[in-house]
C-alpha cells in the first residue's frame, strides 16, 4: 500500500469523511485518519455526529416521541394502549445499532471510493519535500505523507470550570445519550440546542427536568416570535426552564448532585438532581495534532484560523467543520469538506453561509434559515413579515399536531426572501424549500405562486408567503 497521498484528511466526522470521499471522486489518492473507537476498540468513523451527536440523539428523540404519543396522543385517535411499558434498554440498544450502521456505512463508502482509512490519531511530524509527514498512532504506528492536509478534528463539550464531566453524575452529550435508568430529577445547565433536545428525550420518558440558563432571553439566536412560541409550548409540556440564572457551586454526592444557583430575581437556590447534563457549548479540538510543531495558527478562541476558503496559514493545509469558525453543524462541516476538496482540484467550491439551515429537533421542531426579525431591525433593513399558524392547516389537524407557525421575512422593496422561521411539525423537512428559495434569491411571491400539494404541511409555507402580501387564503 502506498503511504504517499495527494490528500490526507485528519478526522473522520462529517467534515472529514466527506472531504476524503470527494477528493477520491476527483481522482486524488486520499486517506482519512480517525481515532474514534467503538466499545470493542474497533474503528467508529463518523465523529461526534455519528457516535455521540446528531444520529444517536435523533434516534432517542424518535423513540421517546413514540413513547409519549403512545401514552398521551394515541387515545385521541381512538387507539387505546393498555399496559404501556418503557424498555429503556431496548431503546438504547436500538440507538447503538443505528450508530453502528452509520459507522459501517462510512467504512463501506471508503472502500467503494478507494479512500484509505487509518484507525488512530494523526499528528504532524514535519513539513518537507512535497507536503507533510503525518504520524498515525493506532494499533500499529506508521508515518504517511500528504501533499494536501485537511484538518477536520471537530469539537469537544465545554465543561463548567469547577465541575468536570464524570459521565456518571455530571454528563456531557456522551453521558446524556446513555443514561441507563430514567432519572427522577434531571438537571440541565444551558437551554441551548443540546439542553432542549436531551431535556425533551428524558422528560418524555418520565424524568422531571429542570433547565438552568444563564441568559435572560430564551434561544437568543432564534427569531424572537418563534422563540417565545417555543418557550410557551415547551413549558406547557412540562420542561421547567429557568432563565437568567447564575450557576454557583456544583457538588456531586454518592448518588446525586447538588447545584447552587442564583435565580433571575437574585435569590439563592439549591437543587438536587439524580443526573446533571451540562450543555453550555462546545470547544474546538486540536488536542494531540502537534499543530504547534509545524506552526499552525489558531485564533484567540482556539479555533484553527482559516480564511474564507478554509485555508490555514500553512501552504496546502486546510481546515473544516467544528474546528473552524462558523456554526457547529454537521451539514456546514460537510459543505466545507466538499468545497475544500474541489478547491484542491482547482474548482470553485462554494459554501453560502447565508443559507445554512438550523434545526432544533424538539417537538414541535424549530427550523430557520436567513435573518431573524431582530437582526433585520438591528441592521436597519426594511422588511415585510407574513405568518401562518399550523392551527389553520388541514394536514396538521389530521396529524394531531397544530402547534406553531411558519414566518416569512422579505425585503420591503424587492420582496426577496431574507429569512424563514418555523416552529411546528416537521419543520426540519419544511425548511428545505426555504433554503432552495433563498439560494435562488426567490421572492415571497415566487413561493406564493408555486402549487403546493394538498393537504400538506408545506401549504403553511405557501400561506405564510401569501401573508407577506396580506393575502393568505385560509387564515
Ligand atoms: P466531528 O464530528 O467532531 O469529528 C471529528 C473527528 O475527528 C472525530 O471522530 C475525532 O475522534 C477525530 N479526531 C480528532 N482529532 C483527531 C486526530 N488528531 N487524529 C485522528 N482523529 C481525530 N449538527 C447538526 O447539523 N444536526 C444535528 O442534529 C446535530 N445534533 C447534535 C447533537 C449533539 C448531542 C451534539 C454534541 C452535536 C450535534 N450536532 C448536530 C453537531 C455536529 O455533531 C457537529 O457539528 C459535527 O459533528 C462536526 O463535524 P466535524 O467533522 O467538524 O467534527
Ligand atoms: P448551545 O450554544 O446551543 O447552548 C449553550 C447554552 O448554554 C446557551 O444558551 C448559553 O447561554 C448557555 N450557557 C453558557 N454558559 C452557561 C452557564 N455557565 N450557565 C448556564 N447557562 C450557560 O450549546 P450546546 O447546547 O452545548 O450545543 C453545542 C452545539 O452543538 C450547538 O451550538 C450546535 O452547534 C450543536 N448542536 C446542534 C444540534 C442540531 O443541529 N440540532 C443539536 C445539538 C447540538
Image (tube, helix red, strand yellow):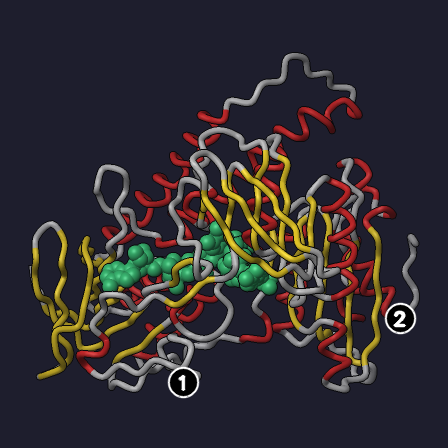
Q: Locate residue 100, reporting x and y percent.
A: 34, 39
**The C terminus appears in which quarter of the rendering?**
bottom right
Q: Residue at x 40, y 50 (%)?
A: 165
Q: Locate residue 427, reporting x and y percent.
A: 67, 52
- 18 relative position to 412: left or right: left
Which comes before the other along the chain, label 1 or label 2?
1
Instruction: Indicate the quadrant of ligand 2 in the picture.
Output: bottom right
Q: Nearer the viewer, residue 109 or 377?
A: 377
Q: Residue at x 89, y 70 (%)?
A: 469
- 190 relative position to 39: left or right: right
Q: Locate residue 126, reporting x and y percent.
A: 12, 78
Residue placed under numbered mark 1 in the picture: 307
Q: Locate residue 410, reporting x and y percent.
A: 78, 75
57 to 189, vertically: above or below: above
Disc 1 CB within 8 Å of nearest ligand 1 atom: no
Tag in front: 1 or 2: 1
Label placed on residue 2:
none
Residue placed under numbered mark 2 in the picture: 469
Q: Quadrant of residue 347?
A: bottom left
Tell me, yes or no, if residue 12 can be seen here: no
SS for callout 2: loop
| Local crowd size for mark 1, using a 10 Å CA cut-off: few (<14), some (14–19), many (≥20) | few
- 149 relative position to 1: left or right: right
457 to 30, vertically: above or below: above
Tell me, yes or no, if residue 468 can be seen here: yes
SS for callout 1: loop
Q: Quadrant of residue 213?
A: bottom right
Q: Residue at x 85, y 46 (%)?
A: 391
- 317 relative position to 351: left or right: left
| Local crowd size for mark 2, using a 10 Å CA cut-off: few (<14), some (14–19), many (≥20) | some
Amino acid at each position: 500500500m502506498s503511504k504517499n497521498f495527494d490528500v490526507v484528511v485528519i478526522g473522520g466526522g462529517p467534515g472529514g469523511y466527506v472531504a476524503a470521499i470527494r477528493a477520491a471522486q476527483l481522482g486524488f489518492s486520499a486517506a482519512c485518519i480517525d481515532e474514534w473507537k467503538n466499545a470493542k476498540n474497533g474503528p467508529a468513523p463518523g465523529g461526534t455526529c455519528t457516535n455521540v451527536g446528531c444520529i444517536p440523539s435523533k434516534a432517542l428523540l424518535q423513540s421517546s416521541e413514540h413513547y409519549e404519543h403512545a401514552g398521551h396522543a394515541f387515545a385521541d385517535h381512538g387507539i387505546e394502549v393498555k399496559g404501556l411499558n418503557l424498555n429503556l434498554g431496548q431503546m438504547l440498544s436500538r440507538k447503538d445499532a443505528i450508530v453502528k450502521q452509520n459507522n459501517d456505512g462510512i467504512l463501506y463508502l471508503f472502500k467503494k471510493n478507494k479512500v484509505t482509512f487509518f484507525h488512530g490519531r494523526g499528528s504532524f511530524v514535519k513539513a518537507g519535500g512535497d507536503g507533510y509527514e503525518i504520524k498515525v498512532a493506532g494499533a500499529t504506528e506508521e508515518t504517511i505523507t500528504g501533499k494536501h492536509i485537511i484538518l477536520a478534528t471537530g469539537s469537544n463539550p465545554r465543561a463548567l470550570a469547577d465541575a468536570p464531566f464524570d459521565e456518571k453524575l455530571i454528563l456531557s452529550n456522551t453521558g446524556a445519550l446513555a443514561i441507563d435508568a430514567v432519572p427522577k430529577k434531571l438537571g440541565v445547565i444551558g437551554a441551548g440546542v443540546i439542553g432542549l433536545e436531551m431535556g425533551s428525550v428524558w422528560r418524555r420518558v418520565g424524568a422531571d427536568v429542570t433547565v438552568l440558563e444563564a441568559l435572560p432571553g430564551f434561544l437568543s439566536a432564534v427569531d424572537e416570535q418563534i422563540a417565545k412560541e417555543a418557550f410557551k409550548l415547551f413549558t406547557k409540556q412540562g420542561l421547567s426552564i429557568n432563565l437568567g440564572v447564575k450557576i454557583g457551586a456544583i457538588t456531586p454526592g454518592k448518588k446525586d448532585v447538588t447545584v447552587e444557583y442564583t435565580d433571575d430575581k437574585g435569590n439563592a437556590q439549591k437543587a438536587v438532581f439524580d443526573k446533571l447534563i451540562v450543555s453550555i457549548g462546545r470547544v474546538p479540538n486540536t488536542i494531540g495534532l502537534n499543530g504547534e510543531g509545524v506552526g499552525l495558527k489558531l485564533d484567540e478562541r482556539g479555533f484553527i484560523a482559516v480564511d474564507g476558503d478554509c485555508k490555514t496559514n500553512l501552504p496546502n493545509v486546510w481546515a473544516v467543520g467544528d474546528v473552524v469558525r462558523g456554526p457547529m453543524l454537521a451539514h456546514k462541516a460537510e459543505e466545507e469538506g466538499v468545497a475544500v476538496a474541489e478547491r484542491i482540484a482547482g474548482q470553485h467550491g462554494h459554501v453560502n453561509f447565508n443559507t445554512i439551515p438550523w434545526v432544533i429537533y424538539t417537538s414541535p421542531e424549530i427550523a430557520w434559515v436567513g435573518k431573524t426579525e431582530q437582526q433585520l431591525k438591528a441592521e436597519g433593513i426594511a422588511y415585510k413579515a407574513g405568518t401562518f399558524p399550523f392551527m389553520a392547516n388541514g394536514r396538521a389537524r389530521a396529524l394531531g399536531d397544530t402547534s406553531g407557525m411558519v414566518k416569512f421575512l422579505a425585503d420591503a422593496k424587492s420582496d426577496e426572501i431574507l429569512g424563514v422561521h418555523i416552529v411546528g411539525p416537521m419543520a426540519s423537512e419544511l425548511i428545505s424549500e426555504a433554503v432552495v428559495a433563498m439560494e435562488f434569491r426567490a421572492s415571497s411571491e415566487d413561493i406564493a405562486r408555486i402549487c403546493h400539494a394538498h393537504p400538506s404541511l408545506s401549504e403553511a409555507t405557501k400561506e405564510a408567503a401569501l401573508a407577506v402580501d396580506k393575502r393568505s387564503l385560509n387564515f
